[in-house]
Image (tube, rainbow, N blue to C red):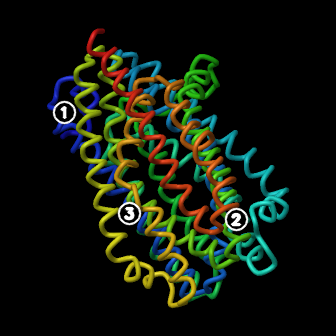
């Protein structure tokens, strides 16, 4: 598939071919990023220690919060641009590009200023103790300092995909991952910077990829490119982007609350090692989640374009095909993690206590994992066609109405097992509701 004409063939090319062309680059890029996060934990586990992994896990709520603000702009802009391209409103899509850049810079700087100032109290609230707060602080000070780079890099990558350049988006992510993996051992082991070295490697690698993205959009031969008059924030674009991006924003915001409750529950019933165990299990979960997210990113421009062009049969076709592959990926993750947990965990640490804690949690977390594939694609389906209200509802019910109550109630009766069991229990309940909602939306599209 030629990247130069791909926005124009989203409404005519075979769905399976389009999904492969858009999803495979996204899967490669996101899987590589997830593998980097796993490698990052491995470097920290072997180069710094088991408590450093626990310190890193304590930063997850704050990282999710940062991702929430990033997705507020990036996901909304991606969907908006896809729909406008489908409607052949090229000037509007170009103005959306300029607004993405401006909004990400503003939000990134504001986020950094606020959270750097209150960093220690925030980490203590997240469950950091005297043994782990130093590691968490050292890591987040550097990550937060480079937050505007991260937000802008992720936002422009979303625009690359939605504007018909999935391979370019993949190359940008792969470049960041490769540079990161090269710098990480140099900074941690060679320079002796410890956990700070990992953070510096992350920021520097994203900065290099951001420079390449800016060079791409500075090229006037591109359909979407930087030019005068597109950077001033326009109320209609900001409202549309934030409205669509509100669902992933709230989802990440809820994820931050969920991880906070998980960390607090694990600390109360299992201590620092239990938090470290969750940090490892979370990295493994994200490996498979990132593959599914890659499928979602491949689906999004196809569904958004065809919805804008009112080719609804193509919208449902690409959604069903994406669900099929996502459930397959999640089922593979379930099988591997149930059969070989110890072999996987030994990659991260040689600490026997940490391995035992993580192995126990991993089997529970992956107990109903196949349904996660369906659930993620269904929520993304509503986002892709601009139905942010439904997507927000699904995101909030899974995390706020189902998972949070489980995390509050179950540990009181079952201790640490109640913390772990809360995750698959919420996924199972939420999937039933999701199935009813997507079936109803498919019926509406079939009669439109």
* Residue 138 rendering spot, x and y as whole percentages: 73, 73
Specify the quadrant of the image occupied by residue 418: bottom right
The residue mark sitting in front, 1 or 3, is 1
Specify the quadrant of the image occupied by residue 312: top left
Q: Is residue 50 above or below residue 233?
A: below
Marked residue nearer the N-terminal end (2 or 1): 1
Q: Is residue 203 visible?
A: no
Please indicate whether residue 106 sits to the left or right of residue 427 in the image.
right
Labelled disc at residue 140: 2
User: Distance from label 1 to label 3 (Cα)?
Assistant: 25 Å
* Residue 190 rendering spot, x and y as whole percentages: 56, 89
Cβ–Cβ under 8 Å for marks 2 and 1: no
Marked residue nearer the N-terminal end (1 or 3): 1
Q: Is residue 162 above or below residue 86?
A: below
Labelled disc at residue 32: 3
Q: Is residue 223 visible?
A: yes
Please indicate whether residue 377 sits to the left or right of residue 109 in the image.
left
Within-10-Å neighbours for mark 3: few <14, some 14–19, many 20+: many
Instruction: Report the residue marked by disc 1.
Output: 15
* Residue 122 rendering spot, x and y as whole percentages: 80, 59
Depth check: give the residue in front, 389 or 75. Answer: 389
Question: From this viewpoint, which residue is outermost toward the front?
Answer: 413
User: Distance from label 2 to label 3 (Cα)?
Assistant: 22 Å
Within-10-Å neighbours for mark 1: few <14, some 14–19, many 20+: many
Depth check: give the residue in front, 43 or 436. Answer: 436
Q: How many marks?
A: 3
Marked residue nearer the N-terminal end (2 or 3): 3
């Amino acid at each position: 598939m030629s990247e130069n004409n791909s926005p124009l063939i989203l409404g005519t090319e075979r769905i399976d071919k389009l999904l492969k062309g858009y999803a495979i680059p996204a899967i490669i890029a996101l899987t590589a990023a997830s593998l980097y996060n796993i490698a990052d934990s491995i470097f920290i586990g072997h180069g710094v220690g088991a408590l450093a992994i626990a310190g890193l896990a304590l930063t997850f709520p704050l990282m999710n919060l940062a991702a929430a603000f990033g997705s507020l702009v990036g996901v909304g802009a991606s969907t908006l641009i896809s729909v406008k391209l489908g409607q052949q409103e090229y000037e509007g899509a170009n103005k959306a590009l300029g607004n993405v850049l401006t909004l990400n810079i503003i939000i990134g700087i504001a986020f950094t200023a606020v959270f750097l100032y209150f960093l220690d109290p925030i980490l203590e609230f997240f469950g950091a103790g005297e043994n782990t707060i130093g590691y968490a602080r050292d890591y987040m000070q550097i990550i937060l300092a480079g937050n505007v780079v991260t937000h802008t890099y992720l936002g422009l990558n979303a625009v690359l995909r939605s504007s018909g350049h999935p391979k370019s988006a993949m190359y940008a992510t792969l470049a960041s991952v490769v540079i990161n993996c090269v710098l990480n051992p140099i900074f941690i082991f060679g320079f002796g910077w410890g956990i700070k070295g990992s953070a510096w490697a992350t920021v520097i690698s994203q900065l290099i990829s951001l420079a390449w993205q800016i060079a791409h959009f500075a090229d006037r031969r591109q359909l979407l490119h930087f030019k005068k008059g597109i950077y001033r924030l326009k109320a209609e674009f900001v409202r549309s982007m934030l409205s669509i991006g509100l669902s992933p924003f709230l989802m990440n915001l809820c994820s931050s609350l969920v991880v906070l409750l998980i960390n607090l529950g694990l600390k109360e019933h299992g201590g620092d090692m239990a938090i470290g165990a969750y940090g490892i299990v979370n990295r493994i979960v994200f490996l498979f989640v990132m593959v599914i997210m890659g499928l979602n990113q491949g689906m999004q421009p196809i569904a958004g374009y065809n919805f804008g062009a009112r080719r609804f049969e193509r919208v449902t076709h690409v959604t069903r095909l994406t669900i099929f592959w996502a459930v397959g990926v999640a089922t593979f993750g379930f099988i591997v993690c149930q059969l070989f947990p110890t072999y996987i965990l030994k990659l991260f640490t040689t600490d026997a206590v940490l391995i035992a804690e993580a192995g126990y949690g991993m089997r529970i977390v992956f107990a109903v994992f196949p349904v996660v594939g369906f659930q993620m694609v269904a929520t993304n389906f509503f986002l892709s066609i601009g139905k942010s209200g439904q997507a927000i509802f699904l995101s909030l019910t899974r995390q706020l109405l189902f998972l949070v109550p489980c995390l509050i109630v179950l540990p009181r009766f079952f201790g640490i097992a109640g913390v772990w069991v809360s995750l698959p229990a919420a996924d199972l309940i939420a999937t039933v509701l999701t199935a009813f909602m997507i079936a109803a939306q498919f019926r509406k599209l079939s009669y439109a």
